[in-house]
Image (cartoon, rainbow, N blue to C red):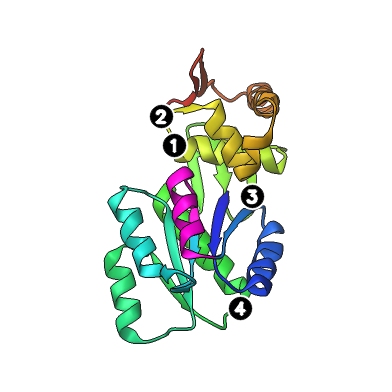
């Protein structure tokens, strides 16, 4: 899962990212209004952590831009501004949640999980598709009630495909999801193919149907 932290306090951004790395999240950063606009224009995120007070502009304007671009990224406002009108305005514009500073990182993680679960997986911690079952909290996968051991990247890919079921996803989009903006500096996307190959092999050997289809010359699609 990929997150964008829009926050101008470097120490806070680093502490959030360090904590979330242990929860298998990949974090990117924007510490100004201009950088945040650039990031949301170029990339999509499972969840955005948004400070309202940014150098160069208001976080509420970021929310308005996300809405203008019809983006589906989840948004949690994290701000020291805890006035009721700011919270109401942010939620009305399109934020999914609001967390006032200071906050416990464990609570932030729970809020992030809830937003992603609500947006991508229909409010459930348990994803079931015929013989396939995924427990989001335990980060475990079963096929026909037997465990399938996946790496973090393989599980991330599986959730990304299911969260975008019946949509064709390009190899470039998958590379960007797994590596963030570092994907632009890679010579090739062969690592994406390697992860997908391993994922398909493990699911097949466990007796899972072939939901993950290769769309030759285009990308991949998880079909229901």
The alpha-carbon separation of the residues under discs 3 and 4 comes to 22 Å
Residue identifier under label 3:
139
User: Considering depth in this image, is 11 or 208 the residue closer to the camera?
Assistant: 11
Question: Closer to the N terminus: mark 2 or mark 3?
Answer: 3
The alpha-carbon separation of the residues under discs 3 and 1 comes to 18 Å
Q: Quadrant of residue 57?
A: bottom left
Q: Residues within 10 Å of mark 3 (few under 14, many from 20)?
A: some
Residue extending farthest to the top is 216
Q: Residue 180's spot in the image, x, y percent?
A: 61, 44
Callouts 2 and 1 close, C-beta under 8 Å:
yes
User: Considering depth in this image, is 13 or 30 the residue closer to the camera?
Assistant: 30
Vertical relation: 149 (above or below) 53: above
User: Considering depth in this image, is 144 or 214 the residue closer to the camera?
Assistant: 214
Residue drawn at x 57%, y 40% as measured from the top left: 177
Magenta residues span 32-47
Question: Closer to the N terminus: mark 2 or mark 4?
Answer: 4
Number of the front mark, 2 or 3: 2
Q: Of helix, strand and loop, which mostly describes the magenta segment? A: helix
* Disc ID at residue 104: 4
Q: Residue 14's spot in the image, x, y percent?
A: 69, 67
Q: Residue 190's spot in the image, x, y percent?
A: 69, 23
Identify the secondary structure beneath mark 4.
loop
The alpha-carbon separation of the residues under discs 4 and 1 comes to 31 Å
Q: Residues within 10 Å of mark 2 (few under 14, many from 20)?
A: some
Residue drawn at x 58%, y 38% as measured from the top left: 176
Q: Residue 219's spot in the image, x, y percent?
A: 51, 22
Residue identifier under label 1:
164
Callouts 4 and 1 close, C-beta under 8 Å:
no
The alpha-carbon separation of the residues under discs 2 and 3 comes to 23 Å
Residue extending farthest to the bottom is 83
> In the image, is residue 44 part of the stretch drawn in magenta?
yes
Residue drawn at x 49%, y 83% as measured from the top left: 80
């Amino acid at each position: 899962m990929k997150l964008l932290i829009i926050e101008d306090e470097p120490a806070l951004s680093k502490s959030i990212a360090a904590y979330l790395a242990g929860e298998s999240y990949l974090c990117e950063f924007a510490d100004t209004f201009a950088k945040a606009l650039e990031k949301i224009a170029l990339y999509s995120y499972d969840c955005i952590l948004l400070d309202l007070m940014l150098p160069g502009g208001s976080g509420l304007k970021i929310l308005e831009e996300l809405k203008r671009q019809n983006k589906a990224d989840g948004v949690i406002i994290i701000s020291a501004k805890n006035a009721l009108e700011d919270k109401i305005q942010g939620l009305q514009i399109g934020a999914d949640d609001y967390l006032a500073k200071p906050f416990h990182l464990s609570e932030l993680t729970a809020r992030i999980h809830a937003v992603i679960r609500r947006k991508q997986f229909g409010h459930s911690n348990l994803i079931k598709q015929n013989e396939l079952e995924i427990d989001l909290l335990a980060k475990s996968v079963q096929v026909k009630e037997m465990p399938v051991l996946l790496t973090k990247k393989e599980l991330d890919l599986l959730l990304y495909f299911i969260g975008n079921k019946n949509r064709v996803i390009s190899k470039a989009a998958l590379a960007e999801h797994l590596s963030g903006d570092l994907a632009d500096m890679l010579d090739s996307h062969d690592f994406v193919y390697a992860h997908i190959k391993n994922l398909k092999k493990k699911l097949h050997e466990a007796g899972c149907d072939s939901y993950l289809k290769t769309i030759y010359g285009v990308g991949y699609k998880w079909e229901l």
